[in-house]
Image: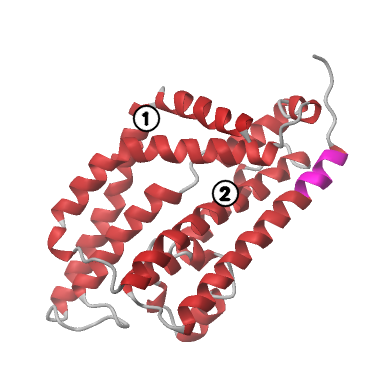
Amino acid sequence: MKKYWHVIGIGLQSNLTYRFNYLTRTLFSFIPLFAMLSLWRTIYANNGGTVEQNGFSQSQMIFYYMLVAVVDVFTAVNEDDWQIAADIREGNISQFLLKPVDYLWYRLCLFFSGRIAFIMMAIIPLAIFIFCYRTYFVMPVNGLALIVFPVSLLLTALLQFFISYAMAMLAFWLLEISTFIFILFAFEYLASGHLFPLALLPAPLFHALMFTPFPYLLYFPISVYMGKVAGNALWLGLAIQAGWVLLAYGSARFMWGRGIKKYSAFGG
């Protein structure tokens, strides 16, 4: 365990070297959010400002996008899949086959160190963003939501990472996987609730999406915070989210095992 704490420390030092890049990335990530907020304000203004959109009032819709920013800062995978694919393609994983270090746990430690560094750089822009819309900010609907939300947030981060890790394993078979990563990212952006709350979708499509892991990457933890899911639905959703994490972890392990059998490296 000590060696993985050491990896986190090294990862923090490495990531903080590029703190200006993190700050720039954070600032630019708020641009589409401001655009979406302006769009929804216009939509609600044309409807008199009081009409709800599938259970979302104007203030709730604005707060939803505030939470999108929060969840992204804490859980989003940035370049982990690209780096893992590069390690495979360039033969850097050979050292992990000869040392008592599990590559998946090594990358997970780097992922969390990257999140810590990113949060350190993003906390001020995020605080300014929340301050600008402070009149729409509300605390969790109840104490249970306050407790479950961080748990769901952690599961979201793990699910994000394991899906990205499994996708990166395609580098064992394919020389270039950027197309698959972009397709996954585009679909995830729509199906996770980044663009709009999934509750706005037609009921059949919404319920179909809930059988996939994508809503649990963003929409579900936000719904927990806002009280959109409660009672038995809350515990069922949390169990499903945990189930997807375990399934993604199993898939990542399976693809690694299959890929190593195909892997070969030459030279020193």
Depth check: give the residue in front, 244 or 27.
244
- First along the sequence among labels 2 and 1: 1
User: Residue 109 at x, y = what percent?
Assistant: 56, 38
Separation (CA) of disc 2 from disc 1 = 21 Å
User: Residue 198 at x, y = what percent?
Assistant: 42, 73
Is residue 127 one of those drawn in magenta?
A: no
In what element is the residue under mark 1? helix
Name the residue tied to disc 2: 161
Say which quadrant the N terminus sits in. Answer: top right
Residue 134 relative to residue 5: left or right = left
Furthest-right residue in this view:
261
Which residue is drawn at the image coordinates 39% and 52% (left, top)? 72
Query: In the image, is residue 46 above or below residue 192?
Result: below
Q: Majority secondary structure of the magenta segment?
A: helix
Is residue 259 one of those drawn in magenta?
A: yes
Label ID, residue 21: 1
**Residue type at tag 1:** Asn
Furthest-front residue in this view:
2
Which residue is drawn at the image coordinates 46% and 77% (left, top)? 234
In what element is the residue under mark 2? helix
What range of the chain is rendered magenta?
A: 255-261
Which residue is drawn at the image coordinates 50% and 28% (left, top)? 9
**Residue type at tag 2:** Phe
Label ID, residue 194: none
User: Residue 189 at x, y = what percent?
Assistant: 46, 59
Depth check: give the residue in front, 178 or 222.
222
Q: Nearer the viewer, mark 2 or mark 1?
A: 2
